[in-house]
Image (cartoon, grey):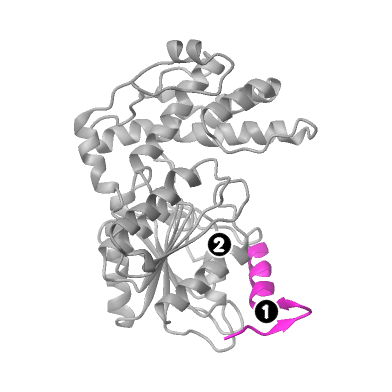
Amino acid sequence: MQPSTNHGQPVWLRIAIVLASLCVLIAPARAYADLPAPAIPGCTTDVLPSGGLSLVCIPIPGVTGPATGWNHGFVVYAHGYVNFNEPLQLLPDGTAIPLLVLSQGFGFAATSYRQNGLAILEGVEDTEELMAALARQFGQLPAYIVGASEGGLVATLLVERSGSFIGGLAACGPIGTVRGQIDYFGDFRVLFDEYFPHLIPGEAIAIPSSVIENWYTGYYDQIFNALVADPARTDELLRVGHVAHPFNPALPATFAIQARFALDVLRYSIFATNDGFKKLGGHTFDNRDRVYTGSSNDVELNRRVHRFNAQKTALSALQGYETSGNLNKPLVTLHTTGDHVIPYALHEPPYLGKVLSQAKGSFLAQYAPPTFGHCTFTPSDLLTAFSDLRTRSGF
């Protein structure tokens, strides 16, 4: 069905743009204790048996939803990575996504998961708990799973392993190789230590607690200033680390963007390393045979860079986080080609290969907006991908 238009712009797109802009006016939900009432009209909160927090929203006709009201379907959302030392959050990715969902006539549901940090398997289990709670309250209703970043992997695993959903949308997720993603963060950390030595204490597989505690109050600004002060060195670091980034020396803002992109990647080294070690029973970063290229002196760089061997017990545990590509329901993926945190090339082509090896290619559709940034989608990007998912699932 073709959407109606006004002044050449689809109604759903105009609504989406307005709703997306509202996210700056509506405070996102934080910890459960800080949320006496839901931030979005028509929402209720609860606690799941696992201890994860849950949010369930039904569209209000003419307020958060269309005049026709609720279509008796749900979009269940799996959120992105939250630092392990932060409180549980119901909407860490903000309110734009639930508002977009409600505007389309769907109910919206989400869980904080029972824990932060590395929470992929827990996210899968807690989302299943949330689905059971929805079934008790509303009966069996059609539902889509949608996830972003870490939640994109949660969504993909649920489409592969669960019968609870009629399809899924995985945005900017590490769906091709979790081990490769961890190595990507580790590689960037050891390279950073060579290009900008002595700025971060500790090493790639062990982060001092003082660095974690003072990352945003001291280290962040110090590193940002060092990166901006030497843009050529920063650019080479990003290139050797295969970090997608814009670079135009004629535009001074480019240097600040480079620095922010580098710090975005370093964040995962700082906050995810110790947490991952604890939950996996060891560290999985391995660069013993890695050859780094693209520097001004590759021989010297490879001689000097710190080397680490992965621990077998941790690698064994990590296998449970990997996707299979075995789809029996439609999955649509959305990934910017210039994603600097979860690289497009590291995940989307390999995941397509997994799906094709299972002879399940008809269940997969991939969208790749040619822009920089992690999960930097427009409302149009999201709604186009979701519309395709609806067409493929028949709801």
Name the residue beneath numbered marker 1. 11
- Residue under the image location 34 percent in, 29 percent down: 285
Whichever of labels 1 and 2 marks the residue nearer the N terminus, that label is 1
Looking at the image, residue 208 lies above or below residue 389: above
Q: Nearer the viewer, residue 360 or 68?
A: 360
Q: Position of residue 62 (x, y in %)?
A: 61, 83
Helix, strand or loop for disc 2: loop
Give the percent coordinates (x, y) of residue 181.
40, 39
Give the residue at the far bottom of this rendering: 68
Q: Which residue is mark 2?
A: 95
Position of 282 with respect to 341 (left or right) is: left
Q: Is residue 131 magenta?
A: no
**Relative depth, front residue between 85 and 21:** 21
> Pointer 2: residues within 10 angstroms few (<14), some, or many (20+)?
many
What residue is drawn where x is 36% and y is 52%? 353
C-alpha distance separating marks 1 and 2: 20 Å
The reply to whether residue 368 is visible in this rendering is yes
Label 1 secondary element: helix
In this view, 14 is above or below 204: below
Which one is closest to the eye, mark 1 or mark 2? 1
In the figure, 47 relative to 302: above or below? below
* x and y percentages locating residue 68 in the rendered image: 55, 89
Residue numbers of the magenta segment: 1-22
